[in-house]
Image (cartoon, rainbow, N blue to C red):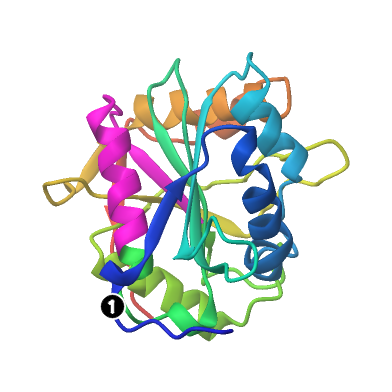
Amino acid sequence: MKYSLRRVDELEIITIANHDDEELLDEFHTGIYWDAFADQQEPVAVWKRALWGGASPYELTIRIAGRALRDRARREILGGIAFERYPRSGCGLISYMVIAPAARRHGLGRRLQRDAAQTLFAAGAPAVFGEVNDPRRTGEGTAEPAPDRWRRVERNQVWGARVLGARYVQPALAHGLARDHGLCLIALSGAQPLPATMPGHVVRDFIDELYRITEGAPPEPAMLEAIPDLVELIELRR
């Protein structure tokens, strides 16, 4: 049976906690996650090592939303979010969020992102970031049409996010994958609206730690040197 979403409060939201949730995680990864991130997917083995490997260099949380999530026969996954906390910089990253077509435009994405950001800020994060396809760039890292990229950025801006005024290149997420040059970093808001700028050292510390964890080495010095001491937080307009 396929459902349509009428109210966000009709949903069950599960935080993946242990191996009892492994089948649900696999179904999410091979289903709506894979459909949404076919060009930028992270192997599920990477998630499992971070969740259950016992020695992950960062804290990963995955939440899955839907109905009857514990019932294989009736389960309907309608959305999910993955977010990370990096211990050295303290920063948070919303690494993936996907909403099934039947559940879009009902507030589920906003709820998942808001709750994840609040969780990270409550844990002491000085900043919470997200990655989106940059609508100003063409032919770099994604085949997503420019109008769709603009809608994604604009939706996040309505939710309070702003685009960082600094060049960003996503590191390779696993062996055999390439860096992604077509993304931009966004800063997510907490309980208060974002200021006009963010300290550059916060951004540099986060990117340096992200590269060391994902690629096993720091980024090129020029990448960090290009980040100004005060990074503008921009509201992009077409």
Q: Nearer the viewer, residue 96 or 21?
A: 21
Q: Position of residue 130 (x, y in %)?
A: 44, 50
Q: Position of residue 50 (x, y in %)?
A: 63, 28
Q: Amino acid at mark 1?
A: Arg
Identified at 64% across, 62% down, the residue is: 72
Identified at 32% across, 84% down, the residue is: 6
Please indicate, yes or no, whether residue 219 appears anywhere in the rendered image.
no
Where does the C terminus fall, quadrant-wise?
bottom left
Q: Position of residue 140 (x, y in %)?
A: 70, 64
Does 48 appear in magenta? no
Q: Would residue 218 appear left or right of 125 to someone viewing this image?
A: right
Please indicate, yes or no, whether residue 5 appears anywhere in the rendered image.
yes
Magenta range is: 111-131
Q: Nearer the viewer, residue 126 or 20?
A: 20
Q: Would residue 135 appear left or right of 154 to someone viewing this image?
A: right
Q: Nearer the viewer, residue 221 or 70?
A: 70
Give the image quarter of residue 223: top right
Q: Would residue 87 appear left or right of 194 to someone viewing this image?
A: right
Check disc 1 and report the residue beneath it. 7
Does 127 appear in magenta? yes
Where does the N terminus fall, quadrant-wise?
bottom right
What secondary structure is found at the residue carrying circle 1? loop
Q: Would residue 234 appear left or right of 193 to someone viewing this image?
A: right
The image shows residue 60, relative to residue 90, as above or below, that is below
The image shows residue 209, relative to residue 82, as above or below, that is above
